[in-house]
Image (cartoon, rainbow, N blue to C red):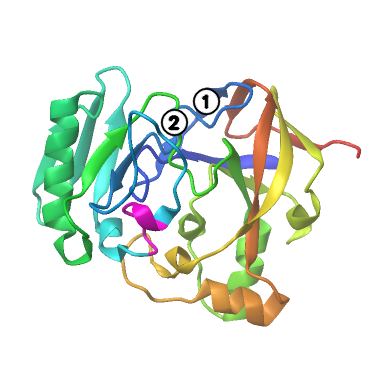
């Protein structure tokens, strides 16, 4: 097996950023992955005492398909986040400062007006991950499984519908669902698979058009009897991951 794609998603619900390589630390996510999030106005999130909340408390594709129209990029050296809308309007602010977060939150609230609840707030809490699960994990998708799902559906299924960090090539379709409890050696990093990923309505959203034009959850259930696609893994031994790295499933 090899790593075909690497992505981080600095803002929960927004653009995937392709990486050629990345260094990960034990017990952590990919650097800057889900580091920022727009909380709904009624979300009980307190940045002074951060705790994990379900995705529905934040801007997410499951509830805010329109967010897929935005193109965001985070520049680590400058600390600036640039977000562009389809009409050419944009905002560039630092999500690392209170003033920058306020401006980003106000801009996104206007763009997502029809799906907002109360006055949304843009958040960044160093060390906190706005992941879909409470543990700090890396998400992994087997591209053969995506291809098999597309073949069963009789239509293309863009791999970014599944918003994973690592996309693998070279494993049999759906074999990854049997890796829970097993370790992977990926490049110089050791990962332990801890959980299958149950899919939600976010996968209905086409990442290129923002249209809800497919129903992968129903397709998974009908074809395979479950709604799982991909796995979560914890970083056991940190190191570098890079596109093209070999990935080995270690003996149980």
Residue named by callout 2 = 128
Q: How crowded is mark 2: few (under 14 residues within 10 Å), some or many (20 or more)?
A: some
Is residue 206 shown above or below 41? below
Task: Give x and y (percent) for residue 112.
Answer: 19, 59
Judged by its main secondary structure, the magenta piece is loop
**Which picture quadrant has residue 111?**
bottom left
Q: Which of 156 and 214 is in front in this view?
A: 214
In the rendered structure, does residue 191 fall within the stretch colored magenta?
A: no
Find out whether the residues at labels 1 and 2 contact each other: C-beta distance under 8 Å. no
Is residue 122 shown above or below 161? above
Q: Nearer the viewer, residue 220 or 28?
A: 28
Give the position of the N terminus as an image quadrant.
top right
Q: Which residue is drawn at 62% across and 26% down?
A: 27
Secondary structure found at label 1: strand
Q: Residue 147 carries which label?
A: none
Q: Is residue 182 left or right of residue 233?
A: right
Q: Which of marks 1 and 2 is in front?
A: 2
In the rendered structure, does residue 59 fall within the stretch colored magenta?
A: yes
Task: Give x and y (percent) for residue 73.
Answer: 29, 37
Q: How many marks overall? A: 2
Task: Give x and y (percent) for residue 9.
Answer: 41, 41
Q: In this view, does 50 lie to the left or right of 149?
A: left
Q: Which mark is residue 22?
A: 1
Is residue 86 shown above or below 124? below
Q: Give the range drawn in magenta.
A: 56-62
Secondary structure found at label 2: loop
Q: Residue at x 25, y 24 (%)?
A: 96
Q: Is residue 135 left or right of residue 215?
A: right
Q: Which of 92 and 132 is in front in this view?
A: 132
Q: Residue at x 62, y 65 (%)?
A: 147
Q: Do we see residue 209 in this rendering? A: no
- Furthest residue toward right: 252
């Amino acid at each position: 097996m090899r790593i075909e794609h690497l992505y981080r998603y600095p803002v929960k619900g927004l653009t995937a950023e392709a990486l050629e390589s990345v260094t990960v630390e034990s017990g952590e996510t990919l650097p800057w992955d889900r580091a920022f999030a727009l909380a709904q106005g009624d979300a009980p999130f307190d940045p002074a005492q951060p705790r994990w909340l379900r995705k529905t408390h934040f801007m997410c594709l499951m509830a805010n398909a329109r967010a897929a129209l935005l193109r965001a990029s985070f520049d680590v050296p400058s600390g600036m986040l640039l977000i562009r809308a389809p009409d050419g309007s944009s905002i560039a602010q630092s999500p690392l400062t209170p003033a920058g977060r306020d401006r980003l939150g106000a801009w996104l609230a206007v763009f997502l007006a029809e799906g907002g609840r109360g006055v949304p707030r843009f958040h960044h809490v160093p060390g906190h991950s706005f992941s879909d699960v409470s543990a700090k994990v890396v998400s992994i998708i087997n591209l053969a499984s995506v291809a098999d799902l597309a073949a069963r559906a009789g239509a293309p299924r863009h791999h970014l519908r599944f918003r994973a960090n690592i996309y693998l090539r070279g494993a049999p379709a759906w074999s990854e669902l049997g890796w829970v409890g097993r370790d992977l050696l990926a490049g110089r990093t050791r990962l332990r698979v801890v959980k299958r990923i149950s899919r939600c309505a976010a996968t209905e959203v086409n990442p290129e058009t923002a249209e809800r034009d497919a129903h992968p959850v129903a397709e998974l259930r009908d074809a395979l009897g479950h709604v799982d696609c991909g796995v979560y893994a914890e970083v056991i031994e940190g190191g570098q991951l890079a596109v093209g790295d070999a990935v080995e499933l270690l003996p149980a």
